[in-house]
Image (spheres, coloured by chain):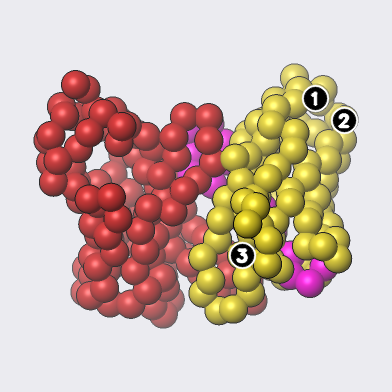
Chain colours: A yellow, B red
Amino acid sequence: ETGVTQSPTHLIKTRGQQVTLRCSSQSGHNTVSWYQQALGQGPQFIFQYYREEENGRGNFPPRFSGLQFPNYSSELNVNALELDDSALYLCASSLWAGGAEAFFGQGTRLTVV
Amino acid sequence: GDSVTQMEGPVTLSEEAFLTINCTYTATGYPSLFWYVQYPGEGLQLLLKATKADDKGSNKGFEATYRKETTSFHLEKGSVQVSDSAVYFCALRSDQGGSEKLVFGKGTKLTVNP
């Protein structure tokens, strides 16, 4: 059974650019959630995907968007990057079953300069 | 909306000392409660959980009891080790808006010295 994997682990982008982060969910899981963790803060919920549909969104602007694929892997896209987007982005997968545990990947560290 | 407040750090202890990290929450209904741990450069690992009032979650010597009357879920360990040095996050699971999202506290950094 493979765990949640995210890629890349680190990247540096310039303000105004666009970025795509990827997440492979744990085997058997059909739900993916994305979180942003700023330095020294707790993770903040961005959105969740279930069966390829967005299923809830946190307080993030529309330039944060996502996709979920038929194999339940997922992408997080951020357009028009801002300096404040610098953070650790965490992906969590779970089985949609009313209370199932979420398993986190190691995260992608994004630095916007 | 739902929120979690946890004790601000950093916390520095000597090995074998007693640990308490306070956590209180605000939520509608009766959420499930969690403690996650984050080691340097890594993602989050679930440490323990409790799904209803008076439940006690435990793992690796850590314990926390779901107290509905005080809306608290304090983390305790009787004797910490150097390997326990990490950041600890208290969280609740919120079902608002149709998604099952986790709401986290700001985290408490623990350093255990030999």
Coordinates of residue B27 in the picture (x, y in percent): 41, 70
Under circle 2, the secondary element is loop
Q: Element type at marker 3?
A: strand
Instruction: Report the predominant secondary structure element of the magenta stretch.
Output: strand
Place of residue A58 in the rendered image (x, y in percent of width and height, measured from the top left):
65, 58
- Residue tagged by mark 2? A17
Q: Which residues lie in the magenta part? A: A33-52
In the depicted view, which residue is nearer to us: B78 or A41?
A: B78
- State yes or no: residue B50 in magenta: no
Q: Which quadrant does the C terminus of chain B fall into?
A: top left
Q: Position of residue A39 (x, y in %)?
A: 53, 31
Can you tell which quarter of the image residue A94 is in?
bottom right
| Kind of residue at badge 3 | Ser
Q: Tell me if label 1 and label 3 are in contact, CB under 8 Å.
A: no
Residue type beneath disc 1: Lys
Label pair 2/1, CB-CB below 8 angstroms: yes
Residue A22 at x, y percent in the picture: 78, 45
Mark 1 surroundings within 10 Å by alpha-carbon count, few (fewer than 14), some (14 through 19), many (20 or more): some
Circle 2: residue type: Gln
Q: Quadrant of residue A28?
A: bottom right
Mark 1 or mark 3, which has the lower sequence index? 1
Label at residue A94: 3
Q: Give the residue at x 39% y 60%.
A: B34
Q: Is residue B100 above or below residue B39?
A: below
What crowding class fits label 3: few (fewer than 14 Cα within 10 Å), some (14-19), or many (20 or more)? many
Q: Does the segment drawn in magenta span residue A42?
A: yes
Which of the labelled discs sits on residue A13, or is there none? 1
